[in-house]
Image (spheres, rainbow, N blue to C red):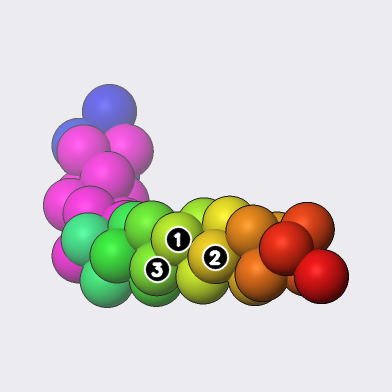
Amino acid sequence: MQDAAEFQWTLLPLWMSFVPYLLLYSIVSSFVFALVNKK
């Protein structure tokens, strides 16, 4: 069980660096979608 907890703590920083990119991607994709619909 201790290994699982350690695995979670190594995964957490990975998620913290991944989530902002995911947020940025969703914002950019929605922005591009709005631009395409404008034409």
Residue 18, compared with residue 7, is above or below; it is below
Q: Is residue 8 left or right of residue 29?
A: left
> Which quarter of the rendered picture does the C terminus lie within?
bottom right
* Magenta stretch in the rendered image: 4-15
Q: Which residue is mark 2?
A: 31
Badge 2 vs badge 3, beta-carbon distance below 8 Å: no
The nearer-to-camera label among 3 and 1 is: 1
Please tell me which residue lies in front, 24 or 9. Answer: 24
Q: Which is the main secondary structure of the residues drawn in magenta? A: helix
Which residue type carries mark 1?
Ile
> Which quarter of the rendered picture does the N terminus lie within?
top left
Q: Which residue is mark 1?
A: 27
Element type at marker 1? helix
The residue carrying pointer 3 sits among few (fewer than 14), some (14 to 19) or many (20 or more) residues within 10 Å by Cα, namely: few
Which picture quadrant has residue 8? top left
| Horizontal and vertical percent position of residue 32 | 65, 71
Q: Which residue is mark 3?
A: 24
Badge 1 vs badge 2, beta-carbon distance below 8 Å: yes
Badge 3 vs badge 1, beta-carbon distance below 8 Å: yes
Which picture quadrant has residue 29? bottom right
Residue 34, compared with residue 3, is above or below; it is below
Which residue type carries mark 2?
Phe
The nearer-to-camera label among 2 and 3 is: 2
Which picture quadrant has residue 33? bottom right
